Image: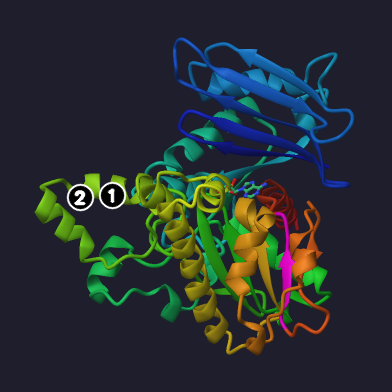
Amino acid sequence: MKILVLNAGSSSCKYKLFNMDDHSVLCQGLVERIGDPTTGALTHKIAPDTDKEEKIALEEPFKDHAVALNKVIALLTDKDKGVIKDTNEISVIGHRVLHGGYFQTTPALVDEKCKKTIRDAFPLGPLHNPPNYTGIEVAEKLFPNVPNVAVFDTAFGMQMPEEAYTYALPKALSKELQIRRYGFHGTSHIYLVNRGAAFMHKPLEQFNCITLHLGNGSSLGCAQNGKCIDTSMGLTPLEGLVMGTRCGSIDPAIVPYIISQKGISAQEVDTIMNKKSGLLGLCGQTDLRDIHRMADKENNADAILARKILIRSIKKTLGSFFFLLEGKVDCLIFSAGIGENDAYVRSQVVKGLEGLGICMDQEKNATRSGDERDISTADSKVKILVIPTNEELQIALTAQEVLAKSKS
Ligand code: AMP
């Protein structure tokens, strides 16, 4: 079975075609600058990350997503370099959709009801849901015989109990505006929980873990018996940890204070908090590798402080989730750019937690690898895993499951 995964952004479209028999990637690519009348770019890789990898790079304008996706189809079905004969070989298309809104708790086969759900959630995901929706509509036209499945990034957070997702705001106001903790990176957290349970040889329904998705955007997830009971992001991805350019949780009264003192709009403060804060706001850099260099080689005080603040914010959230699980934690799972690669951050986050049964093997932690691995000591009560996330594969697996259910 072949499954195509699409992630349509406002001016870009990422795609990956999986062979579900062995979960291998037949090809993947990225179209950029869609909508720019003068120039656009498409990078297409056949058999990526294998010794048979072939790369095709095109530069031409892509007026809209339909033109871009038509080009992708031409590459997929190319007589010489194509990996399929025609689009009917694709069993289902899985779409990444940011927001499912207040009522959508699970992934769904795309029909008119599902499309309305995505449209209704435009105000909650104004930057992502509209282009995600366009991707679905274009796919429906260009792959007329292939079913589509919407996989919502909010699905993990929608598993939370009421006391976890409810903010202590006036009840009627929250209801009217559909304000609740939604949580994001859901596809990644679900993947990590599933892989973590498999790694630990535990049934999902008996598996408790804390997932640390640490990248440019970061969030922690807390799963009890395989289900989300809390997550650090909130109504929007701004809440929670300090991130590359986002401030994470701050005293909400800072917002009206800035507005009144600086005479700027709420929208401008929103932009400051999302795009100019976090590590960037603290030390002028977003990439942790640069921050390490500035801190360790140049003794830069801003970088040293930024790194401390980042680690502290992760540790505080980790501690609260550990308590929510009453200490009954099978493992911590580090993932994403920082979680998978940054041994320093991993070691600092768990430093001093041996008394809680969280014991890191420093040598294993320092060993670089792209594999799923256990970096805790043999006697660590709580295991510490590093699991490379794979959101596209999770979308493909989910689409496969939804399709199978729809047929049964
Ligand atoms: P992501 O958003 O998941 O791509 O993660 C981006 C973050 O991961 C950046 O802050 C990078 O500094 C960090 N990162 C990516 N690769 C590495 C690496 N090899 N070593 C340390 N940090 C890395």
Q: What is the three-letter code of the residue carrying label 2?
A: Ala
- Residue displayed at 50% across by 47% down: 298
What residue is shown at x 84% (from left), y 75% (from top)? Answer: 201
Q: Which residue is mark 1?
A: 270
Side of 313 where 226 appears, left or right? right
The residue range painted magenta reads 382-388
Quarter of the rendering occupied by the C terminus: bottom right
Q: Is residue 279 above or below residue 159?
A: above
The amino acid type, in three-letter code, at marker 1 is Asp
Residue 43, how many percent across, how many down? 66, 23
Q: Position of residue 203 (x, y in %)?
A: 78, 77
Figure quadrant of residue 406: bottom right
Residue, x 62% and y 38% (percent of image)?
Answer: 6
Q: Is residue 154 visible?
A: no
* Element type where label 1 sits in the image: helix
- Nearer to us in this view, 277 or 103: 277
| Circle 2: element type | helix
Q: Nearer the viewer, residue 287 or 13?
A: 287
Q: Is residue 228 left or right of residue 48?
A: left
- Count residues near mark 2 (Cα–Cα under 10 Å), then give few for <14, some for 14-19, many for 20+: few
Instruction: Locate the N terminus by quadrant.
Output: top right
